[in-house]
Image (cartoon, rainbow, N blue to C red):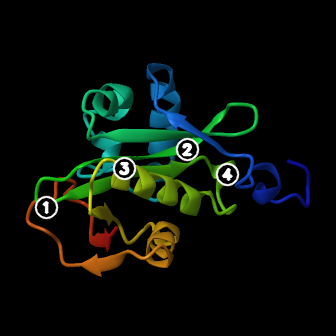
Amino acid sequence: MTEGQSPCHLFGQNNMKLRRIEEKDNPILARIIRTNLKANELDIPGTAYFDKHLDRLSDYYLADERRFYYIATDEEDRIIGGIGLAELGFFDSCAELQKLYLADPAKGAGLGYRLIAAIEDKARELGYQRIYLETHSNLAAAIHIYEKSGYREIEKPAGVVHSAMDRFFIKNL
């Protein structure tokens, strides 16, 4: 990127492509997720940083038809992020939005909104009626995107797995 160019110039919504996760994506996606968490001081137990599936996300998301993960790529097919969903057991007809992360050069271009819209469409296709998510106060930009996308904050549900998370949201589809 040359001086004066914004990330939007390189990673505009029209340039981003989405596809289903594949095994070859695992190491790049794990690096993007861990880099984001570390930059936000969330490389701690109780976060996705230590998720047992993080290094093999394709195994997790391809093992069940009620799960799905989109890989976002740029015009040269480089991975710039992703977003997933899986069935959530503690709310009826509800999926959990999972692991929405973007590489630093792709941030600030509105791609998070497009990823959320895509995973919401997939959730509807799979028959879910709501989407839940959990996040952390350190992730202010993510919280802003969730709120602008129609998610409302709720109290911490009893079934929360990532114990370090401190903000919880839900949206009716």
Mark 4 or 3, closer to the camera = 3
Residue named by callout 3 = 125
Sequence-wise, which precedes: disc 3 or disc 2? 2
* Residue 54 x %, y %: 34, 35
Alpha-carbon span between mark 1 and mark 3: 16 Å
Residue named by callout 1 = 92
Do the numbered discs 4 and 2 sit on residues whose CB atoms are within 8 Å?
Answer: yes
Alpha-carbon span between mark 4 and mark 2: 8 Å
Sequence-wise, which precedes: disc 4 or disc 3? 4
Under circle 3, the secondary element is helix
Do the numbered discs 4 and 3 sit on residues whose CB atoms are within 8 Å?
Answer: no
Residue drawn at 50 percent across, 60 percent down: 117
Alpha-carbon span between mark 3 and mark 2: 22 Å
Q: Amino acid at mark 2?
A: Gly
Q: Amino acid at mark 3?
A: Glu
Do the numbered discs 1 and 3 sit on residues whose CB atoms are within 8 Å?
Answer: no
